[in-house]
Image (cartoon, rainbow, N blue to C red):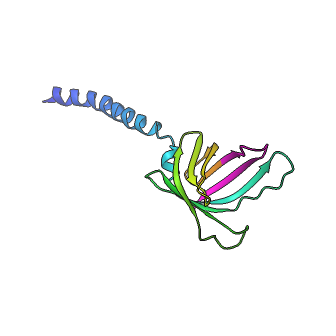
């Protein structure tokens, strides 16, 4: 019996070490995924217009992204005013470094918006939007509601 106990004592550190390696390896790869983080309601916290001297205003109040890759964007009449009752809805695709939105505008024209994701956390996303018809670039900072 003593010999079995001695073998068990020798195996205990090895088993404990293996257990720790197994579970530390599982937690190390837990990187944030943009497709998972994006789901929820996001408000525009701030934005910065880059490029030429053209005045450009962002009238977006908030985005709602759902797991089924659909979204709704709500607009404000002007910064600080009430939200417009006519939101746009469409589909989105989120990758590690991009966010693509596709929707029909009120005139029935298909709109495609591609943003570069500069950085993101569980509660913030920093994007840059490059206007396709001008030199205007807009850095948009959104936060999770």
- The C terminus lies in which quarter of the figure? bottom right
The residue stretch that appears in magenta: 127-145
Give the farthest residue toward the right.
53
Q: Is residue 93 left or right of residue 22?
A: right
Please tell me whether residue 125 is drawn above or below residue 29 in the rendered image.
below
Q: Is residue 100 left or right of residue 15?
A: right
Magenta stretch secondary structure, dominant: strand
Give the farthest residue toward the bottom.
82
Decide which of 29, 84 is in the foreground and name it. Answer: 84
Residue 70 in percent (x, y) is at 48, 54
- The N terminus lies in which quarter of the figure? top left
Q: Is residue 92 part of the magenta span, yes or no?
A: no
Decide which of 13, 138 is in the foreground and name it. Answer: 138
Residue 89 in percent (x, y) is at 53, 58
Q: Is residue 115 left or right of residue 24?
A: right
Decide which of 52, 14 is in the foreground and name it. Answer: 52
Quarter occupied by residue 95: top right
Q: Is residue 140 part of the magenta span, yes or no?
A: yes
Residue 123 in percent (x, y) is at 57, 54
Residue 36 in percent (x, y) is at 48, 48
The residue positioned 73% from the left and 55% from the top of the image is 47
The residue positioned 32% from the left and 28% from the top of the image is 14
The residue positioned 78% from the left and 55% from the top of the image is 56
Please tell me whether residue 13 is drawn above or below residue 126 in the rendered image.
above
Quarter occupied by residue 21: top left
The residue positioned 34% from the left and 31% from the top of the image is 18
């Amino acid at each position: 019996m003593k010999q079995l106990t001695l073998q068990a004592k020798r195996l205990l550190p090895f088993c404990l070490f293996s257990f720790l390696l197994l579970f530390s390896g599982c937690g190390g790869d837990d990187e944030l995924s943009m497709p998972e983080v994006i789901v929820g309601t996001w408000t525009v916290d701030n934005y910065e217009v880059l490029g030429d001297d053209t005045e450009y205003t962002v009238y977006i109040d908030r985005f709602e992204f759902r797991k089924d890759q659909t979204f709704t964007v709500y607009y404000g009449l002007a910064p600080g005013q009430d939200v417009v009752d006519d939101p746009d809805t469409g589909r989105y695709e989120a990758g590690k470094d991009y966010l693509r939105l596709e929707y029909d505008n009120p005139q029935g024209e298909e709109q495609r918006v591609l943003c570069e994701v500069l950085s993101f956390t569980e509660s913030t996303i920093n994007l840059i939007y490059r206007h396709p018809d001008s030199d205007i670039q807009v850095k948009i900072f959104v936060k999770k509601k």
